[in-house]
Image (cartoon, rainbow, N blue to C red):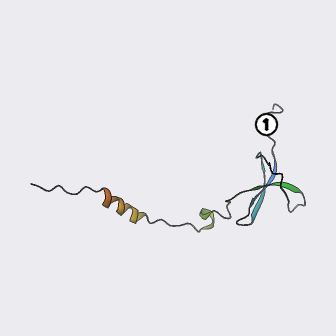
Amino acid sequence: MKEGIHPDYKEVIFHDPGANFTFLTRSTIETRNKETMKWEDGKEYPVIRVEISSASHPFYTGKQKIMDTAGRVEKFRQRYSRSPKVAK
């Protein structure tokens, strides 16, 4: 591999403050704010704050809203259905 063309691949902590959920992984993401956090192994790693993670996303938590699809279909049919032509 050529040197100097690949991004820096390092360990990073992703933190979801809404769910108080963190996980350690490797990433090439830029850590501009230089915030660090101590992990369970005692080492300090850069932190990336995320708004949604698997701990807070409705799909993964099971708190997903069920849409009323039958009502929507009926509204669509009523709005765009053709009325029968009246014979003259």
Give the percent coordinates (x, y) of residue 67.
47, 65
Residue highlighted by disc 1: 6
Which corner quadrant holds the C terminus?
bottom left
Q: In which quadrant of the rendered view does residue 14 lie?
A: bottom right
Picture layout, residue 84 above or below residue 31: below
Q: Residue at x 25, y 55 (%)?
A: 82
Give the percent coordinates (x, y) of residue 64.
56, 66
Amino acid type indicated by mark 1? His
Q: Looking at this view, is 34 or 62 the one in front? A: 34
Which corner quadrant holds the N terminus?
top right
Give the percent coordinates (x, y) of residue 52.
67, 59
Q: In which quadrant of the rendered view does residue 59 lie?
A: bottom right
Picture layout, residue 27 above or below residue 65: above
Q: Residue at x 77, y 59 (%)?
A: 23
Q: Residue at x 86, y 63 (%)?
A: 40
Kindly state the secondary structure of the residue where label 1 is placed.
loop
Q: Residue at x 44, y 66 (%)?
A: 68
